[in-house]
Image (spheres, helix red, strand yellow):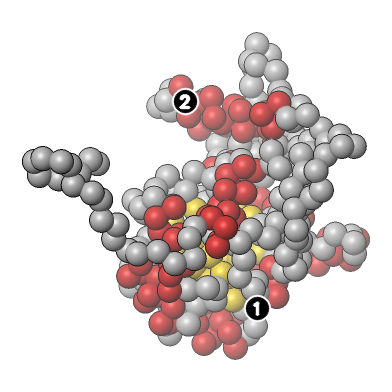
Amino acid sequence: MSKLPAPLNRLPLPIIGAPLFIISNPKLVVAQCSAGVVGSMPALNARPAAQLEDWLAEITETLAAWDRNHPDRPAAPFAVNQIVHTSNARLDADFDVLEEHKVPLVITSLRAPTEYVPRIHAWGGHVFHDVTSIRHAEKALEAGVDGLILVCAGAGGHSGALSPMALTSEVRRIYDGLVVLAGSITRGEHVLAALAMGADMAYMGTRFIATEEARAIDAYMTSPSLTPIQQRFLRRTADLLEQWEMAALDLRDGTHRPRLSLTLTPSAAARPPAATEPQQTTARGAAPPSAGQPPSAPRSSTGWPRISRRSARASSRPRHVSMPRAASGPATTSR
C-alpha cells in the first residue's frame, strides 16, 4: 500500500465514511470517527450556510473531548466534501469556514481543485479528489491533490461507470499515492478486496443510512418506492449495525473474528421484523479462530495487511495479447 498521510496512518480500519447528501451530519461524523472510521459530510448539508460554522465547532469540540477521555483510542480525523464547481455559490465562503477550523481532510468533487490545494495545504489539511476516469485522475494529480477517490460503478452520488478493477489497475500505472476505492462497498470482505486490488482505503456510504445518527427519515426506510431488495438491504443493515459485521477476515492480521462493535445505533424504522432470518454470529458463518490457525499475514506500517500488487498481477505484461487464430476462417473475438 501507499504511504498514508499522517492523519490516516493510525486508523484501526482503512475506511472513509462517504459524505452522504442530506443524510450526513455532525452526529454521524462523530460516531464514525469515534469508531475508528473517517467520518465525512458535504459542506452543503449545512443549511443555511451559517450552520456550517456551528457544525464544525460541534465536531471538533466533541472529538477533542473524545480524545481526552480515550487516549488509548483517539478518534479518526474527519473530512468535509466541497463541490468545486461554478454552480456552488457558497464555495469560497464555505472554504473560509473550513480554513478557520483547519479541517484535516477535504474531499473535492466535480472539478480539479487547482486553486484550492495550496490553501488547504497551508492550514495543514490534505485534499482527496473524486475521479471517475483516468483523465480526471490526471487532472487531479496535476492540481497537486494528496489522494484519489476512485468513484466506480455502483457508487452513490455522482457515480462513475467503470469497473473498480479496471480503474484501479489503470490508475496504479500512473500513480503510487493514496487511492480510495468507492462502489457498492458494504462488507468487510469488500474492503479486503479493495486492498488486494491495490487501493489503500475503501469508501463506504450506504451502510450508514440505517442509523439513528443519520438524517434519513423513518419513512425512507419503509418507503413503498423502494424495491424489495433495497428494503431488505436497509433492514439487514440495521440488523448488522447492532454489532457491525466488519470482516470475514480481520483487516489487521488476516484472522477470522466476530463482528466489531461500533457506537452507531440502528434506526428503529430500519430494524428487521421478528420473523426475519436470525443474525449470523460471524461473517458467512465463519468459525472463530482456533489455536491451530495459520500464522497471521504480514502487516504494513499501518497495521493493515501488506498485500503486494505484484502478487495480484504480473510485474510486467504486454498491453495487448495476441490470440492464436483458428485453423480456418477469420479470428473471432468474444465479449
Find residue 256 and report its image quarter: top right
Q: Nearer the viewer, residue 316 or 40?
A: 316
Find residue 249 and report its image quarter: top right
Please tell me whether mark 2 sits on a helix, a strand or a loop: helix
Find residue 160 and report its image quarter: bottom left
Single out the residue that lies furthest toward the top.
275
Q: Which residue is mark 1?
A: 102
Q: Looking at the image, is mark 2 or mark 1 nearer the viewer?
A: 2
Q: Is residue 79 above or below residue 262?
A: below
Of labels 2 and 1, earlier in sequence is: 1
Q: Nearer the viewer, residue 127 or 287?
A: 287
Disc 1 residue type? Lys
Residue 314 percent coordinates (x, y): 48, 60
Please tell me whether mark 1 sits on a helix, a strand or a loop: loop
Q: Which residue is mark 2?
A: 229
Q: CA distance from mark 2 to mark 1?
A: 41 Å
Q: What number is the disc on residue 26?
A: none
Disc 2 residue type? Ile
